[in-house]
Image (tube, helix red, strand yellow):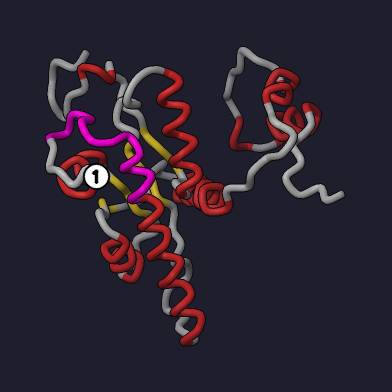
Amino acid sequence: MSNVGTPRTAQEIQQDWDTNPRWNGITRDYTAEQVAELQGSVVEEQTLARRGAEILWDAVSAEGDGYINALGALTGNQAVQQVRAGLKAVYLSGWQVAGDANLSGHTYPDQSLYPANSVPSVVRRINNALLRADEIARTEGDDSVDNWVVPIVADGEAGFGGALNVYELQKAMIGAGAAGTHWEDQLASEKKCGHLGGKV
């Protein structure tokens, strides 16, 4: 039987927590055993999300300033042009999706009125465009870009509901290949644009 997709043991999880510099300073109120107990018998690999998260972490840690420059991309073509210009990450803003790229096809203000799966859908489209650009470059022997498939940081808004909604939305983000997601600390049912005052 193959060991592909086999969940990590509690010992493997604990060793990662103890030795991986990424987890320095993290305090947990749960054990590795508790995490292992929550896993199913098969773990799906999410290559784009994992690879992107590792690249993003390494870039932010290596730069020393704690950030990496990125612009908002609303389409795959915009992301391809950004990578061609030398950017090392792509940002996907919720207000952009609300205004022009949501699955309902309507134009909304930045108030989480659009379908919750819209941002993961755009993440997937951007990743598809970056993967195609990578395939074309390799086929043509074009090595002018080091890494076409750059990390995508996506806006999770205020989560579109409670903790379970956030969980499901994050699963969709990972499945679409997002390297990271940021969440707004405000009540989802009273969501306002993050730049406005008076948030609940």
The residue most toward the front is: 104
Q: Is residue 99 above or below residue 32?
A: below
- Residue 128 picture quarter: bottom left
The image shows residue 129, relative to residue 166, as above or below, that is below
x and y, in percent, of residue 35 in the image: 68, 23
Q: The magenta stretch spans which residues? A: 109-122
Q: Determine whether 30 is above or below 38 in the image.
A: above
Q: Is residue 62 visible?
A: no
Residue 70 x %, y %: 31, 52
In-image side of 124 versus 155 (left or right):
right
Residue at the image point whose x is 24% and y is 45% from the top: 102
Residue depicted at x 68% and y 40%: 43
Quickly name the residue at label 1: 102
Q: Residue 161 at x, y = what percent?
A: 34, 20
67, 157: nearer the viewer: 157
Whether residue 193 appears in magenta in the rendering, the answer is no
Q: Nearer the viewer, residue 30 or 187?
A: 187
Given residues 149 and 88, the one toward you in this image is 149
Amino acid type of the residue that numbered disc 1 sits on in the rendered structure: Asn
Classify residue 101 as left or right of residue 146: left
Question: At 70% across and 18% down in the image, what residue appears?
Answer: 34
**Outermost residue, right direction?**
1
Q: Position of residue 12 (x, y in %)?
A: 78, 34
Q: Residue at x 31, y 25 (%)?
A: 158
